[in-house]
Amino acid sequence: MKSALQLRFLWLYVNSKEDMPMVITSTPPSSNKTSKDYKSWKEDREQYKTWLRIDSAAMGLLNGSIDSTQSSHVVNLFTSKIWDTLYKINVKDQQSLNVYALVEEIWSLNWDSVTPMPDHIGKIIDICCQIVEGKNAMDDIMLAYAIFQSPPNDNIE
């Protein structure tokens, strides 16, 4: 999606690099069409309309690429807020679910006495690295506990 927006020169609107101009009132400041205030108002109004048209094009691409369950989260938002909301729904929330699954996996691992112990410990360390890559803390004490709790209880004398 990011590539499609960049290809159409719309990415600046999504990542808020192209700031929304000040909202212009619909009535001109004076009725004299030759006054400086009127010309400035008209120029600002055209700039605002242009920004809205381009932002609407970016919104159309974004809204066209999401399913109905996500569209309720982005109703009446400008493009940059749509992107932020979709990022939270699809990336941050998914990372949290993935981390939860990884933590569950690490606590359920048991050494099967067939796999060499270094390989078993390597698997635990690999899962810990995945948890850390998901921007979550995994300290050495938790790692040590995961390793020590993983041997089967029947081998402990």
Image (spheres, rainbow, N blue to C red):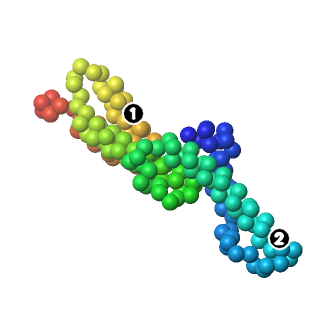
Residue 49 coordinates in the image, percent (x, y): 69, 60
> Where residue 126 is drawn, which disc sits there?
1
Local packing at callout 1 (Cα closer than 10 Å; few below 14, some 14-19, many 20+) is: few
Residue 33 coordinates in the image, percent (x, y): 83, 74
Residue 27 coordinates in the image, percent (x, y): 70, 75
> Where residue 39 is drawn, which disc sits there?
2
- Residue found at the very far top of the displayed protein: 114
The kind of residue tagged 1 is Asp
Which residue occupies the foreground of this view, 151 or 100? 100
Local packing at callout 2 (Cα closer than 10 Å; few below 14, some 14-19, many 20+) is: some
The kind of residue tagged 2 is Lys
Which residue occupies the foreground of this view, 10 or 101? 10
* 63 left or right of 150 in image: right
> Where residue 74 is drawn, which disc sits there?
none
Q: What is the spatial separation of the Cα atoms under label 1 and label 2, in whole angstroms?
A: 64 Å
Can you see residue 32? yes
Residue in view at x 82 percent, y 70 percent: 39
Residue 19 coordinates in the image, percent (x, y): 67, 60
- Quadrant location of the N terminus? top right
* 111 left or right of 48 in image: left
Dot placed on the residue nearer the N-terminal end, 1 or 2: 2
State which mark lies toward you, 1 or 2: 2
